[in-house]
Image: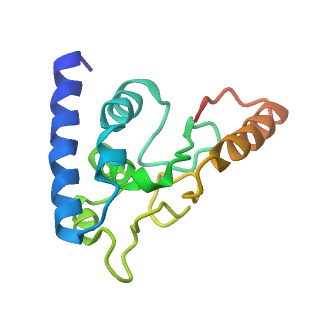
Amino acid sequence: MNLDELSDISKEIGKKLIYMHAKSKESHIGSSLSIVDILTVLYFSILNIDPKDPYNPDRDRLILSKGHAASALYAILSKRGFFSEEILDTFAENNSKISVHPERFSVPGIEISSGSLGHGLSIGVGISLMAKKRKRNSKHIL
């Protein structure tokens, strides 16, 4: 994917985030907008992932330690095809699959439940050590 295509996706995600946060009246929009470009490049150019097989043991993993930026991850995962964009319209609503902080298995593609700043490092180290023990070649990005 070329730079112009990545830039277009990033802009589209940014617009979606503004809509999601305005509709839900949730904060943390700055945290989410600050990582859109990074997530776009990772999910559309770098990570070895397959939305049709989201729990493949050889997949690369992104550990989102700053869980308060979950809306950006949800929007990227939806755009990448992990789940329907309609789910984004329920962001932070009661009984929604996607809350303010990510919860593992709430939707495909969420690797860890997070929110407490800093615990992603220890989780990532554990995941990486297990991958090494099992001789996996996957990347783990914190």
Residue 108 in sight here: yes
Q: Is residue 27 left or right of residue 118?
A: left
Residue 59 appears in which quarter of the rendering?
Answer: top right
Residue 25 image point, x, y percent = 23, 69
**Vertical arrangement, residue 33 with respect to residue 85, above or below:** above
Q: How many marks?
A: 0
Residue under the image location 27 percent in, 46 percent down: 79
Question: Which of 60 and 73 lies nearest the eye of the viewer?
Answer: 73
Residue 2 image point, x, y percent = 23, 16
**Vertical arrangement, residue 35 with respect to residue 3, above or below:** below
- The quadrant of the image that shows the N terminus is top left
The residue at the far top in this view is 2
Residue 92 image point, x, y percent = 33, 71
Residue under the image location 49 percent in, 48 percent down: 53
Residue 10 appears in which quarter of the rendering?
Answer: top left
Residue under the image location 56 percent in, 35 percent down: 60
Residue under the image location 77 percent in, 43 percent down: 126
Q: Is residue 70 left or right of residue 24?
A: right
**Vertical arrangement, residue 9 with respect to residue 68, above or below:** above
Residue 98 appears in which quarter of the rendering?
Answer: bottom left
Question: Which of 79 and 25 lies nearest the eye of the viewer?
Answer: 25
- The quadrant of the image that shows the C terminus is top right
Residue 76 in sight here: no
Q: Give the colour scheme shown.
A: rainbow
**Vertical arrangement, residue 108 with respect to residue 59, above or below:** below
